[in-house]
Image: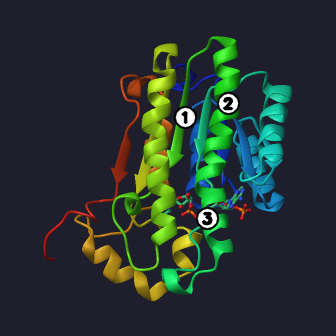
Amino acid sequence: MNVSNLRLKDKVAIVTGAGSGIGEAAAYTFAREGARVVLVGRREAPLLSNVAAISQAGGEAIVVAADVSLSGEVERVVAETLDRFGRIDCVFNNAGIQGNGDPIVAMEETSFDELIAVNLKGPWLLTRAALRIMLNGGQDGAIVNTSSFLSTGATAGTSVYSASKAGLDAMTRAVALEVGDKGIRINNVNPGVIDTPMLRAHGEEIIPPLAARAALGRIGTPQDIADVAVWLCTDEARFITGQSILVDGGFTIPGPR
Ligand code: NAP
């Protein structure tokens, strides 16, 4: 490995939902680029095993088990990050839930509250907390949220999920205007259909038709998204802010198939 080519050398990155799927791939990718990584999620065991793998590969990472929808827990994530690494340079707000796919008439109000709390309020809380540190320190920074192709699209059963992700797209535009002149960027990566536990929960049989719909003839891998999310945090993306970048292999290109 040529250490002089590391794109995030000595940076500190917080990754939520880092125990599985896209967040797991992103945690490894941040570490490979030289960042010190804080892995966040509710279940501690998968986070610990990912930290062990990062450490074994020569990287530096810690676990903070926390629920991103709770303000006190998000404050603890930031406090433990500062305690261990002294700074925050990158935040990947990736943790999310999809709900059970019920149509609106069958949904409980509690499902609405939970989806919005995890998918929208969580990123808002951590963005707010991280920005307060970045702005106080007079430093640059980069924030990326995991939105979705469903922020602009929809399937039956995604009324609240789609709304939560559209909320992220909107939040990102506003925050970009608030902090751009301080050298801080914020963007979304909007995945198409990606092979993670969230997708696999629907059963194997849904995958071939989804793959066939994409121009590239396959569903995405977690790494397909992680690479874009991490790239958005590097200097190569220095003139990109307030954007929602669709990474879907051509899945949503309109027209008959
Ligand atoms: P995943 O493997 O289920 O990852 C979601 C992660 O979020 C889990 O590790 C989960 O860990 C964590 N999480 C959930 N609720 C949390 C909370 N309240 N606090 C902290 N962590 C929490 O699925 P994924 O596909 O990688 O999902 C990552 C993101 O991609 C999500 O925002 C999802 O909406 C988005 N996305 C996925 C697809 C796709 O096709 N897979 C497409 C578009 C967008 P714990 O349960 O341990 O907390």
Disc 1 residue crowd, few under 14, some 14–19, many 20+, Cα 10 Å: many
Q: Quadrant of the N terminus?
A: top right
Mark 3 residue element: helix
In the picture of the structure, the residue carrying the numbered disc 3 is: 115
Q: Disc 1 vs disc 3: Cβ atoms closer than 8 Å? A: no
41 up-or-down from 219: above or below: above
Crowd class of label 3 (few under 14; some 14 to 19; many from 20; radius 10 Å) = many
**Left or right of 73: which side holds 58?**
left
Q: Are the residues flagged by discs 2 and 1 in contact, CB closer than 8 Å?
A: yes
Quadrant of the displayed image that contains ligand 1 = bottom right
Ligand 1 is within 8 Å of the C-beta of the residue at disc 1: no
> Residue 110 sits in which quadrant?
bottom right
Quarter occupied by the C terminus: bottom left
Question: Nearer the observer, disc 1 or disc 3?
Answer: 3
Amino acid type, mark 2: Ala
Extreme residue toward the top, this view: 138
- Amino acid carrying label 3: it is Leu
| Label placed on residue 166 | none
Q: Is residue 22 visible?
A: yes
Task: Return the residue found at the far left.
Answer: 256
Rate crowding at label 2 as few (under 14), some (14 to 19) or many (20 or more) other CA atoms within 10 Å. Answer: many
Residue at x-position 50% and y-position 80% = 104
> Residue 143, labelled with which disc?
1
Mark 2–mark 1 distance (CA, rounded to whole Å): 9 Å
* Numbered badge on residue 130: 2
Amino acid residing under circle 1: Ile
* Residue 252 in the image, given as x and y percentages of width and height: 26, 64
Q: Pick whichever of labels 2 and 1 is earlier in the sequence.
A: 2
Mark toward the start of the polypeptide (1 vs 3): 3
